[in-house]
Amino acid sequence: MADTTNRMLTMAEAVREAMTIAMNEREDVFLMGEDVGIYGGAFGVSSEMQNKFGADRIIDTPISELGIVGAAVGAALAGMRPIVEIQFSDFTAQAMDQIANQAAKIHFMLGGALHVPLVLRTPQGSGTGAAAQHSQVLETWFANIPGLKVVVPSNPADAKGLLLSAIDDPNPVIFLEHKLLYKIPGRDAVPEGVERIPLGVSKVLRHGSDLTIVATGIMVNKSYEVAEKLSAEGINITLIDPRTISPLDMDPIHESVQQTGRLLVVQEGPSHGGFINEVIARVSESASFGSLIAPIKRLAGMNIPIPYAPQLERAAVPQIEDIEVAAREIVKNWR
């Protein structure tokens, strides 16, 4: 059994550890991206990895997202297992043809004859003052493309286990890491060794009888703080982290809604067309809908580009106090 004693890693450390394990396990795994080598990546995730594995496996690339992903797709088709780091998720727009029209579709279009075992890692999210072109949450983009698996870890332990499974996967996985979580240790210890977490399995972080909250990415952490605070007041919350938003495991969500009768969904990205709307739709189409005793409530970012000014940036996405107000409202107004 994996040793979990007191290993409180940050997400950057956990992701680095997962890549290191995968590269030690198999020679066909390599990392490529802008500044991932000597510099160690824009957020230091691949720090010192080039010293360990060499410049032929930790590859600094030109500034060309289209070229980077295109080369990775070709390498994957040739039998390699590339990990691509795109410095900011916003820059994936430069490579969307390779992501959406090539990597995601080749296995299907060729009748399963070829696979594209490619992992694309990229940081997303606001909170660093990086403004409109470096702060977006694009998880819904990728979840809307058949052929892609989409992973959104909220803590270091999950990031490590999910990334190991993503690297094992025979077809493309988009791995979205919130930049504010890179330097923060998780609540739980990170297991040593090679323990995988299967893709497509939601995680129930805490159980309660009054309200179900489903959140993604950093909103899981904000929602957890709210749940802990409100539990002292007798409001007991079940918190569910889908972890993989495509494919989406709805079973724990349906089960919890049937028990609590109330649902709050939270994401950082804009509400219009957002991933949380899919959660709401699936609940509405299921038997769990009949268990609701209150209207479903959603919290999401405003439908605006992320502002540069700190106070405006903060106002543009849900904060802890917003989640607390929404949770109190849905429970106390619908007793």
Image (cartoon, rainbow, N blue to C red):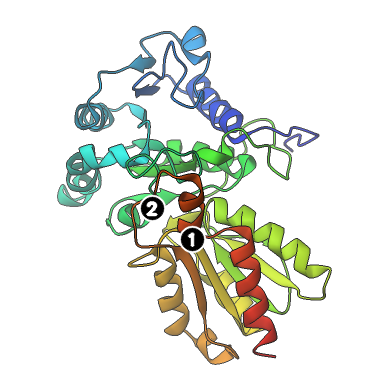
Callout 1, which amino acid? Gln
- Which quadrant would residue 60 be assigned to in this image? top left
Image position of 258 (left or right of 134): right
Image position of 2 (left or right of 174): right
Query: In this figure, which residue is indicated by the disc labeled 2?
Result: 139
Callout 2, which amino acid? Glu
> Which is more foreground, mark 2 or mark 1?
1
Element type where label 2 sits in the image: helix
Question: Could you say where residue 92 lies in the image, as x and y percent from the top left?
Answer: 28, 40
Q: Say which residue appears at 44% left-offset and 44% top-offset.
A: 176
Query: Of 160 and 11, which appears nearest the observer?
Result: 11
Question: Could you say where residue 320 lies in the image, as x and y percent from the top left?
Answer: 63, 59
Query: Of 46 and 80, which appears nearest the observer?
Result: 46
Image position of 87 (left or right of 283): left
Query: Of 77 and 160, which appears nearest the observer?
Result: 160
Q: Say which residue appears at 60% left-offset and 69% top-offset.
A: 213
Q: Say which residue appears at 56% left-offset and 60% top-offset.
A: 202
Q: Say which residue appears at 72% left-offset and 36% top-offset.
A: 2
Q: Which mark is residue 267?
A: 1
- Which quadrant would residue 276 be assigned to in this image? bottom left
Question: Could you say where residue 236 lies in the image, as x and y percent from the top left?
Answer: 75, 73
Look at the numbered discs 2 and 1 and tell me whether their residues touch, using CB distance below 8 Å.
yes
